[in-house]
Amino acid sequence: MEIQIAAAKVNQYGLPESGDTFEVVERPNGGLSVVLADGQRGGKAISQMVVRKVIGLLAEGVRDGAAARAASDALFTEKQGKASCTLNIASLDLMTNTIVLTRNNPTPLAICRGGIVDYISSPSEPLGLARDIRPLINETLLEADLMIVLFTDGLTHAGTRRGQPMEVSMLIQSMLDEQDPSPQAIADELLAHAVSLDEGRPADDISVVVIKVAPRTGDLVRRLNVRLPIE
């Protein structure tokens, strides 16, 4: 098997930078952690602060839930509860052969198995609003055709000002029903549909991250591709 990760993001219309931050960090046991954060009432500075704290702890071998709690307490201490940040961590643990999903985010996530989308929408609090905020944690086995879709609230809120809210799970399901799309194709399609619903002017920052477990077809070289358009 191999792990494929793709991301697509866009700024809120008219703003020079996104308040969302996305990072990938290698774990001490050889696995990877994907971290996605969305800063509220502080934007990029808040999300970067949280992500730096989280990836630093993960790289030292700290458990995901503990890293999320530490980041929340640090944000609360610095901002006294006046700023918050949503957080998703997806960790590929090669020692346990599992994916651990850690969520401090009212926005759902999608877990896809066998072409069926399971929308995880249980209540979850953002970081930084109080002390000792705890994440929701799900763990699932690494298996072929497993796919995880993470996103910030800009995706789910797309189209609401026109009365045509984004139906994320239905769109993912329709893509899976028609073909076997790559993670990048799914991320790009979700983002493009959201921007279209907002009439080409995104009402919020939008980030989509797709993680897929696929059969290994190539060599054992790890690769990462990044595309950063510059105006």
Image (tube, grey):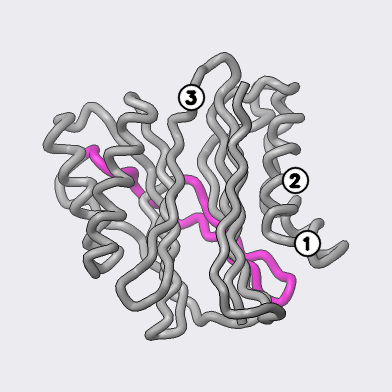
Which span of residues is magenta-colored?
107-129
Q: Separation of disc 3 and disc 1 at Cα?
A: 29 Å
Circle 2/circle 1 CB separation < 8 Å: yes
Q: Which of the two discs, 2 and 1, labels the residue nearer the N terminus?
A: 1
Task: Name the residue type under label 2.
Answer: Glu
Please tell me in which quadrant of the rendered image residue 85 appears: top left
**Height in image: 37 above or below 82?**
below
Whether 112 is among the magenta residues is yes
- Look at mark 3 in the image and give the residue it sits on: 17
Residue shown at 38%/27% (left/top)? Answer: 43
State the quadrant of the C terminus: top right
Q: Nearer the viewer, residue 131 or 78?
A: 78
Q: Separation of disc 3 and disc 2 at Cα?
A: 22 Å
Task: Name the residue type under label 3.
Answer: Glu
Residue shown at 28%/53% (left/top)? Answer: 54
- Look at mark 2 in the image and give the residue it sits on: 189
Q: Secondary structure at mark 1?
A: loop
Q: Secondary structure at mark 3?
A: loop
Q: Nearer the viewer, residue 229 or 103?
A: 229
Q: Secondary structure at mark 2?
A: helix
- Look at mark 1 in the image and give the residue it sits on: 181
| Neighbourhood count class around disc 2 (C-alpha, 10 Å): few under 14, some 14–19, many 20 upward | some
Q: Position of residue 171 (x, y in %)?
A: 75, 51
* Residue 43 horizontal side relative to residue 203, left or right: left
Which disc, if any, is residue 61?
A: none
Q: Position of residue 67 (x, y in %)?
A: 24, 58
* Residue 64 horizontal side relative to residue 119, left or right: left
Query: Given this view, does label 3 or label 1 mark the residue nearer the observer?
Result: 3
Q: Separation of disc 2 and disc 1 at Cα?
A: 10 Å
**Height in image: 112 above or below 86?**
below
Q: Nearer the viewer, residue 122 or 87?
A: 87
